[in-house]
Amino acid sequence: MRLNRTAWSSSPTVLIVDDHEDSRTVGRLVLESRGFHVIEAATGTEGLHKALTERPSVVLLDIVLPGLDGWEIARRIRADAATCNTVIIAVTALAGIEDRHRSYMAGCDSVLTKPVPPSTMLAVINQYVSAHLVPDSVVARVFADVAPAP
């Protein structure tokens, strides 16, 4: 599991890269209803640009895209020092074992096969971000309670 801690706040940003507008809209509505900030991209080139410049906490990445495919985007996100720890979740209709393996080899943290129920999408995203939604003041207080006295 990779964590991009520096980019996370009380409202993590999720980039949805999908060439189907309906998929982006459904994902955005589900995620925004749960407090996530959502940005969108419709092509591979646009998705890579937004991943590298906006540095989202999580990228929901379709694999079959116009321009760059999702596997190439994942590789390039991993190759950039500023985004190499971004959580990448492939969301694809490619359901074969070889496709899943290729997604993991490109750098994806998880692979979801379309259609993805909203509850599954949220559960997978939350497994990566839930620990980072605790306010810093609470973390500092808990740490002070368990840290040995100097």
Image (cartoon, rainbow, N blue to C red):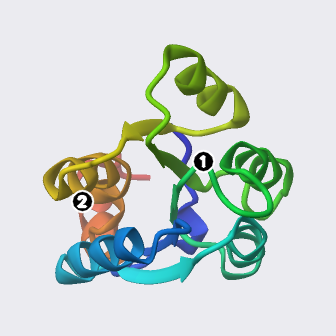
Dividing the picture into quadrants, the one containing residue 46 is bottom right
Q: Amino acid at mark 1?
A: Ile
Q: Where does residue 118 sit, x and y in percent of width and height?
A: 19, 58
Is 72 on the left-hand or right-hand side of 144? right
* Nearer-the-camera pick, 13 or 91: 91
Q: The residue under label 2 is which amino acid type? A: Val
**Which one is in front, 63 or 4?**
63
Q: Which residue is mark 1?
A: 63
Q: Element at badge 2?
A: helix
Q: Residue furthest top?
A: 97
Residue 33 point in image, percent of width and height: 17, 81
Residue 9 in the image: above or below residue 73: below
Which-is-in-front pick, marks 2 and 1?
1
Cα gap from disc 2 to disc 1, whole angstroms: 41 Å
Secondary structure found at label 1: loop
The residue tagged 2 is 142
